[in-house]
């Protein structure tokens, strides 16, 4: 899987796209349409925040949770996979807010946006 093989300081746009594809592949395993609709709505909202232009153009991917999710799914251990997924989401949440707090954010028109 390309996402798991990304180098340190990977391109942010490419990483975010591959990360989204990974997460939606995992979420789709639930076969729960209500869950998928909810996740898609939240992802669209988060995407607007992530789409704000900022100085960071590189990201250091952390794949330990992604590897754990895959390993647990292969073992048929859905609960452990769900735990790893939850950790991944929470760690990403913390990283995103840390970036936003220290970033010089601008919208597409170049206007400063408060963090």
Image (cartoon, rainbow, N blue to C red):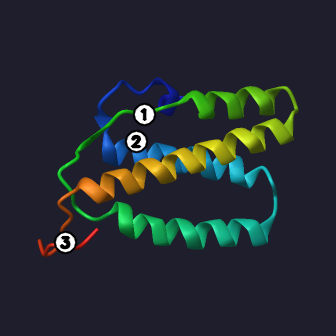
In this image, 84 relative to 22: left or right? right
Of residue 22 and residue 56, the one placed in the foreground of this image is 56
Query: Which residue in the structure is indicated by mark 2?
Result: 15
Q: Earlier in the sequence, mark 3 or mark 1?
A: 1
Residue 61: mark: 1
Label 2 Cα crowd, 10 Å radius (few <14 / some 14-19 / many 20+): many
- Mark 1 vs mark 2: which is more N-terminal? 2
- Identify the residue position indicated by label 3 in the image: 108
Label 3 SS: loop
Residue occupying the point 53% across, 45% down: 91
Q: In this image, 88 relative to 106: left or right?
A: right
Q: Nearer the viewer, mark 1 or mark 2?
A: 1
Q: Position of residue 30 (x, y in %)?
A: 81, 54
Task: Give the residue displayed 85% in from the left and 41% down from the top.
Answer: 79
Image quadrant where one finds the N terminus: top right
Mark 3 crowd level (few <14, some 14–19, many ≥20, 10 Å Cα): few
Q: Quadrant of residue 6?
A: top left
Q: Which residue appears at 81% of the width and 63% of the height? A: 32
Across and down, in percent, residue 3 comes to 49, 33
- Identify which residue is drawn at 46% across, 66% down: 46
Q: Are marks 1 and 2 in contact (CB under 8 Å)?
A: yes
């Amino acid at each position: 899987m390309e996402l798991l093989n990304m180098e340190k300081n990977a391109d942010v746009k490419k990483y975010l796209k591959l990360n989204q594809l990974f997460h939606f592949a995992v979420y789709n395993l639930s076969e729960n349409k209500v869950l998928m609709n909810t996740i898609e709505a939240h992802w669209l909202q988060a995407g607007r925040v992530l789409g704000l232009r900022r100085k960071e153009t590189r990201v250091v991917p952390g794949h330990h949770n992604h590897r754990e999710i895959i390993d647990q799914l292969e073992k048929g251990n859905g609960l452990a996979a769900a735990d790893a997924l939850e950790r991944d989401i929470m760690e990403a949440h913390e990283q995103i807010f840390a970036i936003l707090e220290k970033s010089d954010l601008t919208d597409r028109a170049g206007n400063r946006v408060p963090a």
